[in-house]
Image (cartoon, rainbow, N blue to C red):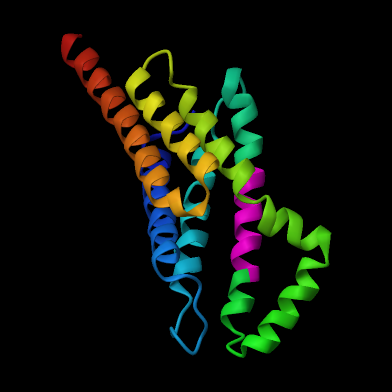
Amino acid sequence: MPNTVDRILLLLGIFSYWCGQTWIVNTGSMTKDEIAIDAIHWLMLVGAALMIPYAARLPRTGIAMLAAPLWIVGIVLIVGMCVIDFVFWSLPDPEFSRAVADKLIASDPLWMPFITYAGMPFTIGLTLAGLAYARTEKMGAGLVAIGGIVIMAWGIGSNPYGYAVLWAGYAWIFWNEGRAAKTLTTED
């Protein structure tokens, strides 16, 4: 089971990923001529990496048994997507960048998993892991579900809202579990 440190890292990871998503929705991708560091994709990369301990320690039962491997695969694909986007950041010449993009798009084994589909297993795994709490934390699990649905249904423009609701759902779950544990400890 994920411990307190894993939960803190998860919340920090979702927050970092949300920052990257919010930034890219508001400004679009940038090149090294526009920004010295591709902070957008660094935020997403760090955010995804911070989620690994939590995803790796999910129990191998129930819905979490499906969530963990999907989420881990999604994290790996998000890391690959960030690497590809770092390459585009390094190419400020629009014609050259378009030529590289055309070559990558024509390479299905590279483009499809890392660009086209990376977000799907990532978001589904992240959402299913939150739904694993549905029996004990209905409100938090509901928020996680709403956030996941918003992200998957409405595309990148909705990501800032979806990840904010997802974060709130996990924060609600962890806060209520902490309160419940504290209540049990003081009653003993």
Q: Residue at x 52, y 61 (%)?
A: 45
Q: Residue furthest top?
A: 188
Quadrant hosting residue 63: top right
Please check the rendered image and state whether residue 30 is part of the magenta-colored stretch, yes or no. Answer: no
Q: Residue at x 45, y 65 (%)?
A: 24
Q: Residue at x 40, y 56 (%)?
A: 16
119 to the left or right of 165? right
Q: Quick check: can you spot residue 56?
A: no
Query: Residue 172 at what x, y percent from top left?
Result: 30, 30
Helix, strand or loop: magenta stretch: helix
Magenta extent? 72-84
Q: Residue at x 65, y 69 (%)?
A: 84
Query: Residue 114 at what x, y percent from top left?
Result: 69, 58
Query: Residue 39 at what x, y percent from top left?
Result: 44, 72
Q: How many marks?
A: 0
Q: Where 99 falls versus 27 (above or below)? A: below
In terms of depth relative to the viewer, which is nearer, 98 or 131? Answer: 98
Q: Where 160 falls versus 60 (above or below)? A: below
Quadrant hosting residue 88: bottom right
In terms of depth relative to the viewer, which is nearer, 113 or 65? Answer: 113
Q: Name the quadrant of the C terminus.
A: top left
Quadrant hosting residue 139: top left
Q: Quick check: can you spot residue 120?
A: yes
Query: Residue 40 at what x, y percent from top left?
Result: 45, 68
Please check the rendered image and state whether residue 82 is part of the magenta-colored stretch, yes or no. Answer: yes
